[in-house]
Image: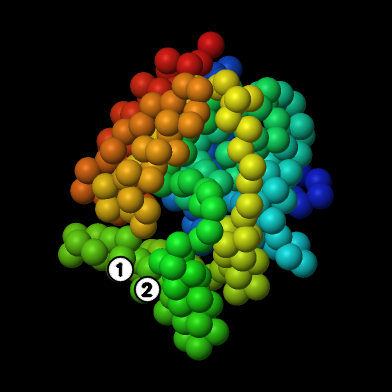
Amino acid sequence: MRRHTTSDVPLHYLDLGREQGDPVFLLHGLGSCAADWRPQIDALGSSFRLIVPDLRGHGASPAPNGDWQIGDFANDLFNLMDQLDVPRAHIVGFSLGGMVGLEMANRAPGRVASLCLINSQPFQGSKPASLLFAYWLRRTVIATFGLKAMGKIIGKKLFPEPAQQALVERFATQMAGMDKRAYLAALDAIFHWDIDIHFQALAMPVFIMAADQDYTPVASKRAFAAQFQQCEIEIIANSRHATPLDQAQRVNTLLQSFLATHSK
């Protein structure tokens, strides 16, 4: 395993797996970190070179001052690719990570060999009332009770089964250790994200995984998938938002097949 940092925003990241394999970036969600990809790292490491960063303000990566945009997250990763001399990579993004991956593909499609989005899509047009409510609820709870309380609330929604209690506690503890300013900066970046997707230029293979019980309905994700030139979509049964964790084996099988089909 190789650990490095980069200039500008010095992202902490893992560089592991098969050194000569196709490079695959695994991009985590809001309030998460690189370590949450462990089930996928174990499954994919024998076939691919895995580059797994802590996004800015998450895990061991620093949180630069000021407001953030999803484009800033994308630029951090382009800088990391340049630092590692990786001209082109497969991008797998969950939630926030999927937004960053889509932003990367939209800005520089030649650098993205394939794109996998897990429970992640832009809101095209006016924001739905459910999103407005969720955004202000999170801000209110964090301001009143702190990040750990917010982590427990979200964790119980993500992992409601009794057997998933350890995941709830892990998520709450991870959230409690995150800098509040960084979390809010990332939350604001998500809320204010506005992307004009150039679907005609996105010729790379795209794969969308949609949990059947995610925040946004499956029908919305199907409509989104239909706009790409070449896109597969898979509905993941009995899953909420954190599909890479609550349906890890299914996700791993699908990723292995998709990446193997589109690798060198």
Residue located at (47% from left, 22% from top)? 230
In the picture, measured across the screen, residue 187 lies left or right of residue 262, that is right
The answer to whether residue 61 of the structure is visible from this angle is no
Q: Are marks 1 and 2 in contact (CB under 8 Å)?
A: yes
Q: Work out whether 196 lies above or below 225.
A: below
What's the distance in space between the residues labelled 1 and 2, CA to CA?
Answer: 6 Å
Residue located at (38% from left, 45% from top)? 220
User: In what quadrant of the picture does the N terminus appear?
Assistant: top right
The kind of residue tagged 1 is Lys
User: Please, which residue is most extreme toward the left here?
Assistant: 162
The quarter holding residue 159 reads bottom left
In the picture, measured across the screen, residue 257 lies left or right of residue 228, that is left
Residue 121: image location, x then y, percent: 48, 46
Residue 119: image location, x then y, percent: 41, 46
Count every numbered label the image shows and give the total. 2
Question: In this orientation, which residue lies closer to the viewer: 110 or 159?
Answer: 110
Q: Which mark is residue 152?
A: 2
In the picture, measured across the screen, residue 117 lies left or right of residue 72, that is left
Residue 253: image location, x then y, percent: 31, 29
Q: Which mark is residue 156?
A: 1
Q: Which mark is residue 2?
A: none
Judged from the image, the secondary structure of the residue bearing numbered disc 1 is helix
